[in-house]
Image (cartoon, helix red, strand yellow):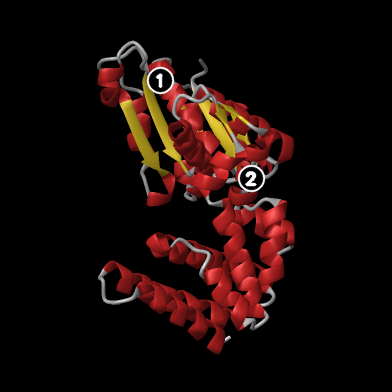
């Protein structure tokens, strides 16, 4: 293994997985004592690199190698501090694995004088956002790690609901693997039941009906939610409203749709739907709706409503009233 690594790219989940694997390889023979020779620093928290370098020059206590990770190394602004790091990289300790993590895209780091210089003495490891076929293959592999197979239709539903948010997708795959039990195949029906594909579609239709001021359809769709899980319905509706707020903020800032999608981790399918709905709702309405939903959720949790079903219907009517 090399002595110095520079991690670049905007896919945080893959970076964290790489770090986890690196730590397992370095301390595999002495995992119980890994903490003795592992140090984590954050460059955006005004660290003094001399501390990290001093530790790097010290022989490991209980392991064959020491592992030091400095996150957000691109945030290190002091010219003196940057020079300290570069000086170490030119003559790194053979007993230490140093990992520098930069929160910049692979295509951008060569334009940074410090990162470009650091790359000359490091093994650069890129981590790009995954899309389309690469994302589908990744989902299949994550299911395989749980000894499961996953139907293409179930894979596509995960992509639609979670975009390319790898952490969120992986969490859902973990839940699905437990959900199907001894069965090897994860189906679309499993994903719909557990991840909420049907409820997601209902929320989208509900917002469409509100934008059209269709009271009858709003109340009809509201009745489709599980009466024993109104808290879940409120949470899902709130999540979608906050998403629309963030989409509107991106539009107001003049961002192209691709940047909005990448920033929010949305698939093209979900981004197109969000862009369409974001243009139909004013930010003031979205904020008011989130506030109303939060208050209703509090009432549910504190049993302040004698009839939560009637309260849910009244809430939907109020959302229509101030649209």
| Rendered image quadrant of residue 158 | top right
Residue 141 versus residue 252 in the image, above or below:
above
Report whether residue 122 is seen. no
Looking at the rendered structure, the secondary structure element under dot 2 is helix
- Badge 1 is on which residue? 24
Q: Label 1, label 2: how many angstroms apart (C-alpha)?
A: 33 Å
Q: Residue 85 carries which label?
A: none
Q: Residues within 10 Å of mark 1 (few under 14, many from 20)?
A: some
Instruction: Give the foreground label among 1 and 2.
Output: 2
For the image shown, how many numbered marks are present on the structure?
Answer: 2
Looking at the rendered structure, the secondary structure element under dot 1 is helix
- Badge 2 is on which residue? 157
Query: Going by the picture, which residue comes out furthest to the bottom?
Result: 321
Residue closest to the eye, 39 or 257: 257
Report whether residue 64 is seen. yes
Residue closest to the eye, 258 or 189: 189
Residue at image point 40% right, 60% down: 229
Q: Where is residue 131 in the image (x, y as percent from the top left)?
A: 70, 41
Residue 111 versus residue 85 in the image, above or below:
below
Q: Position of residue 216 (x, y in %)?
A: 60, 80
Residue at image point 64% right, 41% down: 129
The reply to whether discs 1 and 2 touch (Cβ–Cβ < 8 Å) is: no
Residue at image point 58% right, 67% down: 246
Left or right, 87 with reference to 301: right
| Rendered image quadrant of residue 178 | top left
């Amino acid at each position: 293994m090399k002595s110095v690594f520079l991690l670049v790219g905007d896919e945080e989940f893959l970076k964290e997985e790489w770090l986890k694997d690196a730590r397992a390889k370095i301390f595999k023979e002495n995992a119980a004592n890994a903490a003795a020779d592992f140090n984590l620093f954050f460059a955006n928290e005004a660290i003094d690199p001399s501390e990290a370098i001093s530790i790097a020059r010290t022989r490991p206590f209980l392991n064959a190698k020491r592992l030091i990770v400095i996150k957000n190394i691109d945030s290190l602004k002091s010219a003196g501090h940057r020079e300290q790091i570069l000086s170490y990289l030119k003559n790194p300790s053979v007993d230490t694995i140093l990992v520098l993590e930069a929160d910049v895209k692979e295509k951008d780091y060569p334009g940074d004088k410090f990162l470009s210089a650091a790359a000359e003495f490091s093994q650069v490891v890129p981590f790009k956002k995954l899309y389309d076929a690469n994302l589908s293959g990744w989902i299949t592999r994550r299911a395989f790690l749980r000894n499961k197979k996953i139907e293409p239709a179930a894979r596509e539903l995960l992509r639609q609901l979670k975009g390319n948010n790898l952490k969120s997708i992986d969490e859902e795959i973990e839940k699905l693997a437990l959900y199907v039990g001894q069965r090897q195949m994860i189906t679309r029906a499993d994903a719909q039941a557990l991840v909420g594909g049907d409820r997601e579609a209902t929320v989208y239709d509900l917002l469409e009906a509100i934008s059209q001021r269709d009271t009858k359809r709003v109340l009809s769709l509201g009745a489709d939610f599980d009466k024993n899980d109104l808290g879940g319905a409120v949470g899902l509706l709130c999540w979608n409203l906050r998403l629309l707020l963030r989409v509107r903020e991106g539009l107001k800032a003049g961002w192209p749709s691709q940047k909005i999608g990448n920033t929010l981790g949305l698939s093209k399918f979900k981004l197109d739907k969000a862009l369409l709905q974001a243009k139909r709702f004013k930010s003031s309405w979205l904020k008011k709706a989130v506030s109303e939903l939060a208050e209703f959720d509090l009432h549910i949790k504190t049993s302040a409503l004698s009839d939560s079903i009637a309260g849910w219907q009244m809430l939907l009517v109020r959302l229509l009233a101030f649209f």
